[in-house]
Amino acid sequence: MSLLRGKLITFEGIDGAGKSTHLAWVADFLQNQGLEVVVTREPGGTVLGEALRELLLDHRQTMHAETEALLMFAARREHLDKVILSALQRGAWVVSDRFTDASFAYQGGGRGVPLAKLEKLEQWCLEDFSPDLTLYFDVPVAISRQRVQAARTTDRFEQESDLFFERVRQAYLQRVAEFPDRIRVVEGSLPLATVKTAVAAIVENFWSAQAKEN
C-alpha cells in the first residue's frame, strides 16, 4: 500500500462531539485546493456497509460484543476494498466519519472486547494500512449527551449509559496517547467558531506539508 497517492483523513469522537459538522468544512477546503475529495463514513460507505450500519444501529437489535466487532470490521474491509483504496490510488483525498479508532473505542473501551482481539482483526483486515491524519473531537460525556438528545432519536449506541460513553472516551484518549503523531485532539466543547479555527489550523498545516513533499 506504499504506492498510494492520496491521503485519508478520519474524524473521531463520541456522538455529539461535533465531528460531522467540521468534516463537511474540511471536505470543502480540500476541494478548493483542487483535489478530488471522497466523503464517506463508517460503518457504511458501500452497499454492504450501509446494510450492516442499519443492523448495527437498530435499537431493537441485541448482539454479543464480539459479534458487533466482527460486523464492524467486515464493513471496514469492504469499505477499504470498494471505496478507500481505489480513491487513494487515483490520488483522491478521502475524508471519513470514523475508522478503526472507533472500534478500539466503542467495541474495546465501551463493550470490553479485549484489545488483543481487536488488534488481530485490524491486522487481518487492514494489514499495515492506517489513516494519514485523524482529528479526535474530545468533549465531556455530559455535553455530548445533551447535544444528542436535543438533535434526534437515539440509535442503539446512543441509548447506552453515561458510563459506557466514559469508557469510550477514555479509550479514545488512550489511542491519542498511543498515536500522537497521527491523532490531533480538538476540544469539541469550545464555541463553534473556535473549534473551526483549530480544525482549520490542523488541516491547513497538514495540506501544506503534503504540498511541499510533492
Image: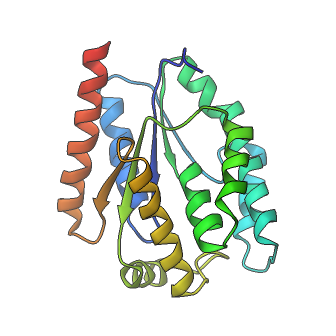
Q: Visible in this render: residue 6?
A: yes
Q: How is the image coloured?
A: rainbow
Q: Which residue occupies the extreme front position in the image?
A: 116
Residue 181 % position (x, y): 35, 41
Q: Visible in this render: residue 15?
A: no
**Occupied quadrant, residue 113:** bottom right
Residue 206 % position (x, y): 29, 33
**Occupied quadrant, residue 111:** bottom right
Seen in the image, is 177 located left or right of residue 203?
Answer: right
Seen in the image, is 57 located left or right of residue 195?
Answer: right
Numbered disc total? 0
Seen in the image, is 61 located left or right of residue 34?
Answer: right
Residue 162 % position (x, y): 51, 86
Q: Nearer the viewer, residue 141 or 158?
A: 141
Residue 171 % position (x, y): 50, 66
Q: Nearer the viewer, residue 39 or 158?
A: 158
From this view, report whether residue 158 is shown above or below residue 1.
below
From this view, report whether residue 35 is shown above or below residue 75.
above
Location of the C terminus (image quadrant):
top left
Residue pictured at 52% horizontal, 71% vertical: 168
Residue pictured at 61% horizontal, 83% vertical: 159
From this view, report whether residue 89 is shown above or below residue 83.
above
Residue pictured at 55% horizontal, 63% vertical: 105
Location of the N terminus (image quadrant):
top right
From this view, report whether residue 116 is shown above or below residue 5.
below
Seen in the image, is 126 located left or right of residue 18?
Answer: right
Residue pictured at 39% horizontal, 85% vertical: 142
